[in-house]
Amino acid sequence: MTPSLIDLASLAGGAIDGHVIAALERAGFPGLRTRHGYVVQRLLAGDRTITGIARSLGVTQQAMSKTVAELERMGYVHRDDDPEDARRRSLSLSSRGMAAVDTARAVRLRLLTRVTADVGATRVADAEAVMRAVLDALSLAGRVDDRTMPVPPGSDTDEGSTHGEEQLDGPGSAPGISPR
């Protein structure tokens, strides 16, 4: 039986994430996982607190605190005093975190360039339109655009999810570290 579009999209998403994570490892960015990309995406979109990121992704503050602590230990995220509220700590990507984002973007661009060379820009644009339709069918297209893809059920980041909708691995999968 030939795999369907949905089967192929699912397999491609996981394979792309694995490809990006392996490239990050080789480039000197160890320890990053797809789930970390959700936090990175929210930081790129302007969220600066654990509470805000947890709320936007539909996970508990405890689960998000654990993920942020991992990123901080690995040197990808900083916590700073919030200039507007001394009780809060503001999050930001470190220079190492931004370098990982830049590396992930370059890896994804090289893959896209290779695929475009193989099949042509028109077919790539058509495939992007089809994938957008799949995301629309799942009510997720806007969440890709605003970097709030929810955590997929069963991923190790959805522990403590605050809702039952599909949840944090996400274009291709929100993360890999950075679709844009």
Image: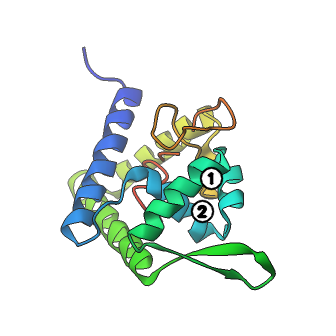
Q: Is there a contact, CB below 8 Å, between mark 2 and mark 1? A: yes
**Residue 37 sits above or below residue 88 on the image:** above
Q: Residues within 10 Å of mark 1 (few under 14, many from 20)?
A: many
Query: In percent of the image, x 49 and y 52: which residue is there?
Result: 174
Whether residue 23 can be seen here: yes
Is 13 in front, or is 119? 13
Is 77 in front, or is 104? 77
Q: Position of residue 2 (x, y in %)?
A: 26, 19
SS type, badge 1: loop
Outermost right residue: 84
Q: Can you identify the residue that label 1 sits on?
A: 148
Q: Position of residue 58 (x, y in %)?
A: 67, 44
Q: Can you identify the residue that label 2 sits on?
A: 42
Q: Position of residue 114 (x, y in %)?
A: 23, 60
For residue 36, which quarter of the picture?
A: bottom left
Left or right: where does residue 101 sit relative to residue 26?
A: right
Amino acid identity at mark 1: Thr
SS type, badge 2: helix
**Residue 10 sits above or below residue 116 on the image:** above
Query: In percent of the image, x 46 and y 37: which residue is there?
Result: 155
Residue 60 is labelled as: none
Left or right: where does residue 132 sit relative to residue 146?
A: left
Is 73 in front, or is 15? 73
Whether residue 178 can be seen here: no
Q: Position of residue 173 (x, y in %)?
A: 45, 48
**Residue 139 sits above or below residue 27 on the image:** above
- 3D distance between C-alphas at marks 2 and 1: 7 Å
Name which of mark 2 and mark 1 comes first in the sequence: 2
Query: In percent of the image, x 71 and y 58: which residue is there?
Result: 51
Amino acid identity at mark 2: Arg
